[in-house]
């Protein structure tokens, strides 16, 4: 029965809506092969329909399968693309290496382009009123106070603040920092806000 | 209902099987019918094929198949659903009961499937609502269909957000969703090794 491999791919995409999976190029290749085969068989039978009229029904069934495979592949890629878009907002413009290797080369290219586009757009914001751009990935929630207390969750290393001070972010250390400096780190899971 | 071309859930719905009757001979397509021994599929054979195939073959001129109602939309089940829809375990009966039903209802000449769908949802709405505020959510969510589960989890998330806001009006900065999930998964993998 055709159209079964492609469903496995779709189920894989559906199972983990919130995490990135490795790009399944092996399965993708198998499906493309299946489609090539279907297409060839259809070409043969379509040429033969002039003698044997009854073959056209078979051609239509295979054609439906081809379209189905195409739809599923596109949906798989599209759902991954949406996740990659989220990656840019949640991990920032530089992906950690273990995330990077989950993407295919084309997907990584797309990520870089999306990242550049977003950066250009953010820089252009507010230029007409004298600002040099706004970072839209900051302040996703309304800021309530200028300083917050945070707990460091991982060994991060040195962090230079805007006023020139350098602080050491070690695991389990507590800090009292300006909100604007640490919210990106909180989103990336380096710091945790203590309430 | 979300049924655009790239929707993953719609693809899964259209993967459900429907009983169909083939109206024409199909040479070399014998493998569609597991019980057939020949290479060709004869006109008049009854085969269960996925909805996507039946939709496409039904829309040809002239149609290649005639679609019959799957058993969960037939009289026997409809009577159960109309009597008390809440007793039915949708997860077992048909995960995509409503969405699948929308596709099927156009093949139902009497038009009863459509009203059954609405009726079922109307009866189960209270159940859905209580499942979304329930603390013991695993048991409450069990009999719900896939789309009902989505509604329930969305409702409980909204409820939680409202409660949080009412309590303090403060919003704590948190780790981004995908980052947190990635961490969890990595930890699980580390433990397995």
Image (tube, coloured by chain):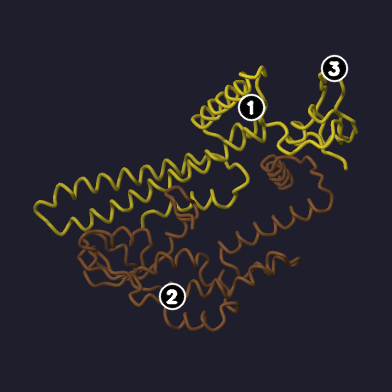
Chain colours: A yellow, B brown
The Cα atoms of the two marked residues, 3 and 1, are separated by 24 Å
Q: Which of marks 2 and 3 is in front?
A: 3
Question: Where is residue B89, by image quadrant?
Answer: bottom right
**Whole-number angstrom distance, CA of label 2 to CA of label 3:** 69 Å
Task: Left or right? Give the position of B7 relative to B86.
Answer: left
Instruction: Residue under label 2, please give it.
Output: B73
Residue B87 relative to residue B58: left or right: right
**Residues flagged by tags 2 and 1 on a common chain:** no
* Disc nearer the start of the sequence (3/1): 1
Subunit ID for the residue under disc 3: A
Chain letter for mark 2: B
In the depicted structure, whether residue A195 falls above or below residue B32: above
- Please report the residue visible at 82 percent of the width from the left and 45 percent of the height from the top: B170
Residue A81, image x, y percentages: 52, 38
Looking at the rendered structure, the secondary structure element under dot 1 is: loop
Question: What residue did someone put label 3 on?
Answer: A163
Q: Please tell me whether residue A181 is drawn above or below residue A4 in the rendered image.
A: above
Q: Where is residue A21 in the image (x, y as percent from the top left)?
A: 58, 42
Depth check: B113 or B76 in front?
Answer: B113
Q: Nearer the viewer, residue A106 or A166?
A: A166
Above or below B93: residue A114: above
A120 up-or-down from B9: above or below: above
The residue at which mark 1 appears reads as A93
């Amino acid at each position: 029965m055709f159209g079964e491999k492609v469903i496995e791919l779709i189920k894989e995409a559906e199972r983990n809506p919130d995490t990135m999976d490795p790009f399944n190029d092996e399965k993708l290749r198998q499906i493309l092969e299946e489609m090539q085969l279907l297409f060839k068989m259809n070409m043969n039978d379509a040429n033969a329909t002039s003698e044997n009229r009854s073959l056209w029904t078979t051609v239509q069934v295979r054609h439906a399968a081809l379209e189905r495979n195409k739809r599923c592949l596109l949906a798989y890629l599209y759902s991954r693309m949406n996740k990659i878009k989220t990656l840019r907002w949640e991990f920032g413009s530089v992906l950690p290496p273990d995330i990077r290797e989950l993407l295919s080369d084309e997907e990584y290219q797309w990520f870089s382009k999306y990242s550049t586009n977003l950066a250009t757009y953010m820089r252009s914001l507010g230029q007409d009123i004298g600002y040099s751009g706004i970072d839209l990935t900051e302040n996703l929630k309304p800021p309530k106070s200028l300083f917050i207390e945070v707990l460091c969750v991982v060994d991060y290393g040195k962090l230079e603040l805007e006023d020139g001070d350098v602080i050491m972010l070690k695991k389990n250390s507590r800090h009292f920092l300006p909100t604007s400096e640490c919210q990106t780190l909180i989103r990336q899971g380096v710091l945790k806000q203590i309430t | 209902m979300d049924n655009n071309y790239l929707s993953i859930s719609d693809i899964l719905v259209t993967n459900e099987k429907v009983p169909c009757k083939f109206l024409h001979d199909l040479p070399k397509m014998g493998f569609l019918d597991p019980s057939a021994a020949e290479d060709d599929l004869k006109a008049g054979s009854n085969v269960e094929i996925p909805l996507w195939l039946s939709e496409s073959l039904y829309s040809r001129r002239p149609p290649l198949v005639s679609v019959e109602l799957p058993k969960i939309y037939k009289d026997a089940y409809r009577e159960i659903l109309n009597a008390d829809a809440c007793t039915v375990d949708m997860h077992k009966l048909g995960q995509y009961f409503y969405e699948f039903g929308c596709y099927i209802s156009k093949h139902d000449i009497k038009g009863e499937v459509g009203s059954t769908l609405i009726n079922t949802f109307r009866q189960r709405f209270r159940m859905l609502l209580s499942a979304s505020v329930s603390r013991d959510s695993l048991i409450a969510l069990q009999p719900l269909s896939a789309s009902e589960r989505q509604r329930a989890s969305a409702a409980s998330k909204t409820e939680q957000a409202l409660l949080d806001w009412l309590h303090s009006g403060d919003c704590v900065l948190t780790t981004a969703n995908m980052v947190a999930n990635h961490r969890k998964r990595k930890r699980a993998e580390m433990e397995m090794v």
